[in-house]
């Protein structure tokens, strides 16, 4: 009997300890909700010049998930849809990103403070491999930064392939 009470107390303690983490993610995800507009740069392929883009994004959050959908355009050159669907389990995140290629790629990572750090697994070879890093960073109450970093296949150096700053409308 004594062992089962100890087990029960340990179990309840674990549940109580996990509750604030879930609440923290819910509050963080909700802080990302809204309509966002901004601009930045995108490199379609390493070695090519960066293109200035204007972007619009709508973000809807649930208790443990977030859906981000929008588009980015560069003058008359192009207009591309982008989206990300993320699910949170504590501070761990996983989901799918659809970028300018229109193809889904896998996302996985974790949140540290106001930034979700994600590994990207492209669905095809991009810049010599299928890996990159993405960050979704909260900037104050009404700012958001989306950034993707890939590696130059010829020298292995990190290259920022997209850097977009948005403000809540």
Image (cartoon, grey):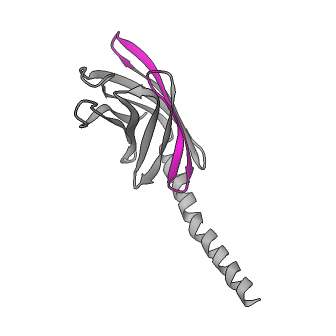
Task: Classify 167 as above or below 14.
Answer: above
Is 81 inside the magenta-drawn segment? yes
In the picture as drawn, the residue positioned furthest to the bottom comes out as 2
**Nearest to the observer: residue 151 or residue 115:** 151
Residue bounds of the magenta highlight:
73-101
Residue displayed at 37% across by 34% down: 166
In the picture as drawn, the residue positioned furthest to the right comes out as 1
Residue displayed at 35% across by 37% down: 147
Q: Position of residue 112 (x, y in %)?
A: 41, 55
Secondary structure predominantly adopted by residues drawn in magenta: strand
Quadrant in the rendering for residue 3: bottom right
Is 59 inside the magenta-drawn segment? no
Asked if residue 1 lies left or right of residue 156, the reply is right
Task: Classify 150 as above or below 10.
Answer: above
Residue displayed at 60% across by 45% down: 62
Asked if residue 34 lies left or right of residue 114, the reply is right
Q: Position of residue 138 (x, y in %)?
A: 39, 46
Q: Position of residue 41 (x, y in %)?
A: 29, 27
Q: Position of residue 117 (x, y in %)?
A: 41, 47
Asked if residue 88 lies left or right of residue 116, the reply is right
């Amino acid at each position: 009997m004594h062992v089962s009470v100890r087990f029960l107390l340990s179990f309840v303690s674990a549940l109580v300890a996990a509750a604030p983490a879930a609440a923290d993610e819910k509050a963080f995800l909700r802080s990302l909700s809204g309509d966002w507009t901004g601009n930045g740069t995108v490199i379609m392929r390493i070695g090519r010049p960066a293109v200035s883009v204007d972007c619009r994004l709508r973000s809807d959050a649930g208790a443990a998930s977030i859906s981000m959908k929008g588009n980015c355009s560069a003058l008359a050159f192009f207009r591309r849809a982008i989206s990300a669907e993320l699910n949170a389990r504590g501070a761990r995140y996983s989901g799918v990103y659809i970028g300018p290629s229109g193809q889904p790629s896998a996302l996985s990572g974790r949140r540290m403070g106001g930034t979700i750090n994600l590994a990207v697994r492209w669905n095809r070879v991009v810049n010599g491999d299928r890996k990159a890093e993405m960050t979704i960073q909260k900037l104050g109450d009404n700012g958001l930064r989306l950034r993707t970093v890939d590696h130059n296949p010829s020298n292995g150096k990190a290259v920022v392939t997209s850097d977009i700053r948005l403000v809540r409308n």
